[in-house]
Amino acid sequence: VNLDSLPIKANLCSNNSVATPRNIPAHDILSSLQTLALDGYFNLEDNGHAAKDFGNIYHCPPLAILHPKAVSDISRTIKHIYEIDSASELKIAARGHGHSLQGQAQAYQGLVVNMESLEGPEMTVDAGEFPYVDVSAGMLWINILHETLKHGLAPKSWTDYLHLTVGGTLSNAGISGQAFRHGPQIDNIFQLEVVTGKGEVLTCSENQNADLFYGVLGGLGQFGIITRARVSLEPAPTKVKWIRVLYSEFSVFAMDQEYLISLENTFDYVEGFVIKNRTGILNNWRSSFNPKDPLQASQFNSDGRTFYCLEVAKYFYIDENEAMNQEVERLLSELSYIPSTLFQSEVSYVDFLDRVHVSEMKLRAKGSWEVPHPWLNLLIPRSRIHEFVHEVFEKILVDTSNGPILVYPVNQSRWNNRTSLVTPEEEVFYLVAFLSSAVPFSKGKDSLEYIQSQNERIKEFCKRAQVGAKQYLAHYKTGEEWEGHFGKRWQVIRRRKSEYDPLALLGPGHRIFQKPI
Ligand code: FAD
């Protein structure tokens, strides 16, 4: 990668280390690292790849990339750096599939550990009373899906896109339309193997090293590098009934979403999104869906108005088709969507879960995948969602449309509050995800700068109106801002950092801890 040729600035990087007379220059540490006997190897030449991520905004080249072949490669490397000096300049970032948005998996002038090259033992599925699969942390979720399906099983909680690694999503949370019932992916893990910032390899779970276990889940890679995970499974369905309906009023849309997630017998997946500033929407948002009533649907006129699309799915086995249809009819009959906008489709379970990959292929073909992605993900308490929606959709995002905007509620009580993830403190809160793409070199309303300024206005509103929002996949520039983000959890985060990564070697891309604790 020629960084100069990118349409965006590479000047957002900073070396997080604090200069002290005792610092050993990173280059010297690197030379000594090369004397270690490892199964894998260091790459000092071609580091452009590790300076890129899906966000395509930050490009911070490391000095070297470690391609580990064994967990011991990671532990030996970290132990060596930890022991060589108490104020090392060489920071270390684990990199999954590089789908971070603001350089979170990068280590400017540091060391990136390429988790995808870790060759752990094969995936092993245990189909016992509490089924699980043991996987290497560099494994992509799509591969786990295919492997577990061979045993008629699958993980319970997902992300919308499966070409992400286990370690990457478990460091954040992993939230999708199943999270209202099962919690995010971090709440569906039985056990982890972790290399701490001191180079120790520890197994942790609810009953063993529990503090590290909960610290690492949602812990933004701050307390250790996850090398293996034991993921909880459930019997996998074969088919999915996938439904979309439209609302013109947010209040009615939200009422129906909240109703659905409050039920015991409900859909298996509940999400929703906003359709704004688009004409002819029925021709593009439902392309692979069929209208329940084609005549009514053809008469529906969207006029470029704002609509809220409820997206739900019911899982089933082929021989349960009739019972599933009855159940879906029952649930739909209790909702207040615009009747002519009921669209449905039946797809395989794999096609449903891997749905975003289809869009990826189309966008890649058009050259629109590797553009800057100034995404903003917020968790908004239920009590403030109406005010938020009014302000954002009627005052801030007035005449733009730069990508999907997801809006859906989840139940706090189904989420484990012992992990490092911070959420609003209400029983129900919404995920609102502004998934924008910027057009390179544009100076208009689809430019990176314009979208970033809109994101700032949204964040400023949340702050000014004290909405109680929390950023998901958060990005801050200073330790003080992070302290505000973690709120009353900050002391626990600090204590865990001092215990598991006292030299603050790990996860420099987040800029949470700039110096040893
Ligand atoms: P990376 O970006 O490589 O790393 C992410 C973070 O985790 C970094 O801080 C990194 O240092 C750290 N890390 C990586 N591996 C390890 C490890 N083994 N141990 C410790 N720390 C580690 N998120 C959702 O929750 N729900 C969604 O539906 C969703 N959809 C997405 C769709 C797309 C198209 C994209 C690009 C992202 C989506 N995400 C979603 C966000 C995604 O979960 C995060 O961006 C995640 O970080 C990406 O995983 P990755 O494997 O690429 O990790």
Image: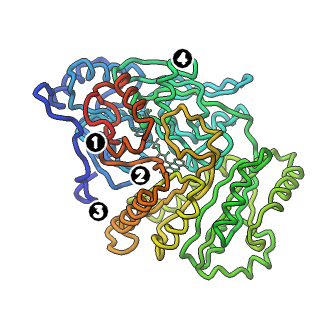
CB atoms of marks 1 and 3 within 8 Å = no
Q: Name the residue under label 1.
A: 47
Secondary structure state at the residue bearing disc 4:
loop
Chain-order first, disc 4 or disc 2: 2
Look at mark 4 in the image and give the residue it sits on.
208
Q: How crowded is mark 2: few (under 14 residues within 10 Å), some or many (20 or more)?
A: some
- For the rendered model, the colour scheme is rainbow
Give the residue type that dot 4 points to. Answer: Gln
Which amino acid, by three-letter code, is at mark 1? Asn
Does mark 2's beta carbon lie closer than 8 Å to ligand 1?
Answer: yes
Q: Which residue does the numbered mark 3 point to in the structure image?
A: 7
Residue 482 vs 254, above or below: the answer is above
Marks 1 and 2 sit apart, C-alpha to C-alpha, by: 16 Å
Q: Mark 2 points at which residue?
A: 54
Crowd around label 3: few <14 · some 14–19 · many ≥20 (10 Å): some
Residue 514 position in % (x across, y down): 26, 36
SS of the residue under disc 3 = loop
